[in-house]
Amino acid sequence: MIVKEEMSLRERMARMRVVEGSYAVAHAVKCCSPDVISAYPITPQTHIVEHISQFVADGELDSEFLTVDSEFSAMSSLVGSSAAGARCYSSTTSQGLALMWEVLYNASGMRLPIVMTVANRALSAPLNIWNDQQDSVGARDSGWIQLYAEDVQEAADAIPQAYKIAEDPEILTPVMVCMDGFILTHVYEPVELLSVEEVERFLPPYRPKNILDPENPKTFGAFADPSYFTELRYMQWDAHRRALKKIETVAREFAEQFGRWYGGLIDTYRADDAEVIIVTMGSVIGTIKDCIDEMRSEGMKVGLVKIRSYRPFPTEALRKALKDADVVAVIEKDVTVGNEGALLTDLKAALYNTPTRIPVIGFPAGLGGRDITVRDIRRVVDKAIAARDRGIEAEIEFLNLREDLL
Amino acid sequence: MEKLLAPGHRACAGCSMPTVINLVLDAAGPNTIVATPTGCSEVTTTPYPESAWRVPWIHSLFENAAAVASGIEAALKHFGKDHNVFVIAGDGSTLDIGMGCISGMFDRGHNVKYVCYDNEAYMNTGVQRSSSTPPCTSTTTTPSGKVSFGNPRPKKDMPAIAVAHRVPYVATASVAYPVDLRQKVKRAISIPGPAYIQVNAPCITGWSFEAGTTVEIARLAVETCLWPLYEYVNGELAGVKKIHVKRPVEDYLKAQGRYRHLFRMKGGEEMIRVLQQMADENARKFGLLYEGDVACTSGE
């Protein structure tokens, strides 16, 4: 889309600072002025809350910061704060997200618009602190909206967008902003930092209709028997359907005000005439774009579809983006043990009831922090072309599997 | 005065829990927000779309009420609002599964008043042992049997754990002593910071006693010294409810089905003696008897 440029490039360059990814996110959180923040230290997320704590300690952010006893308590306390009418933030990763599992479903079921950064990391065992996306992908059914960031700027800019989506009275659904652990949380990049004033113009104040208030006592979290449960779940599902539009609208509004566009539900890169399309999400997109540029210069028609919103799943947008491709390769940093990559399954399902009958193959990659290189991307493209020309040999293949260790 | 927990809820006839809640809310008043974990009180009072609560109320999960209340208190603090924040929870969620969240809430010093209605087992799921179940109690997971006298372990001393967290106000109470309970709730509110009150709350189905005797059973627990009534302020024992006539533990035990086996099994007498020693130790430790009073050694 065409973005209205409010500022000249020179002005924007002048605003840029080289900061750590975690700082950029913490700063974006500060600009959203959450009332209550509750988090627990876990690598590689910790720097985010350390930076936020410093903002609070320096009086730059007027928030209650709860140093809780676990991630389970972190999310539980935010259930209480959010029900009391507070704008809430947390961040976590991996084991911490797993420990929150029960509360994730509860927060979304109670329609509490909490925003949380997930610094994506592998799940134990074996213990591994490095990046993949098994943690948030594993929470895909928890009722949270999930946005995935390609770079630091996007991870930071997604925070005010996440609040605007979550707090919309038509949506009222918590949002996870997923960013690759270490790769994005610990990298130093030039970033345009937001300001409180700018975010205030973008994000309306949070004024929930239903809160815990003795003046107007309400019951939160009643149990629902079989005569009611389905409809309450349906309403959540329907809110996600509305979010498909809302995520696009909010992304556009953000682009209009700030001049930065990351796609709505999805984004595409050189995909219009592409024969081979790679579908993926997260920080590996930078490498893939470089690789696509190389291959394009060699005359190969390769393009990219980036998933920005994994939940709600952008079925229609993907159908449209992939309908003219010859073959699709999914690269994803997760695997559903006992089946295939989660994104691969979702994508195939999205295409099934359409006339698009092209080979779709998947590559679990970068698990536990293994690098995904340009050479790896080329191998994926070669396999995709082979699948197109000679038929699918394997629907799923672990990228860079070390046969010597098996 | 209108009760803040409305009638028409679905608790068992003879259940002490709604009485405990109403005594607490009556003392706390309507300017109160309550968080309740999953359990009997939650399932009997809030079947959607009904609710018996006339104060703002929230239920999230089984083990997180203390954390939820922490978050409520933090939000109120941020907004400069002044409402009482209470947790009203059973013993399973308090002494077992919610222990971590409670420890965190105590440790962070939230102004949250935590009331545990202690019916000494997981009653909502059908009388399974909790760490609040007293020794020699028959539950569905520690049943008495040919080689078992029931629960083999002592009751976890949760008030002591609260005191160890430097919780400024810690007390025990009983549904049989409503004036005492109300005073303790008011005292808890008057002292800033967290408070913990554990209320003996007989369960008619789990304890199996005669209908209409709920309060008598609770009173017997106090009069036998098996349930001492005391309060700690800033770590110091600040008051106890003295007992005029100390009853033998048999009087309490024989009125309840959960101890029936002790009167039928060989060796049961020895177990009753152990329980009597526990009661005697409570009397000594907390100074429950008046000087010169003599313990009553026979029944009735």
Image (cartoon, grey):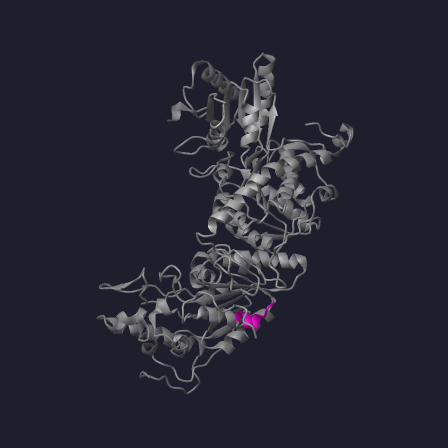
User: What residue lies at 53% left-to-right and 73% top-to-bottom?
Assistant: B184
Q: Is residue A356 above or below residue B195?
A: above
Query: Magenta region, mostly helix, strand or loop?
Result: helix
**Observer-nearest residue: B260 or A64?**
B260
Which quarter of the figure has residue B14?
bottom left
Residue A97 visible? The answer is yes
What is the x, y in percent for residue B2?
56, 72
At x 37% / y 26%, what residue is drawn? A406
Write the start and end of the magenta stretch as one range.
B24-30
The location of residue A131, given as percent across then percent down, is 52, 34
| Number of callouts | 0
Left or right of B267 in this view: A92: right
Q: Is residue A364 visible?
A: no
Indicate the position of residue B95 as horizontal and vertical percent values.
44, 61
Image quadrant in which you'd find residue A84: bottom right
In the picture as drawn, the residue positioned furthest to the top comes out as: A299
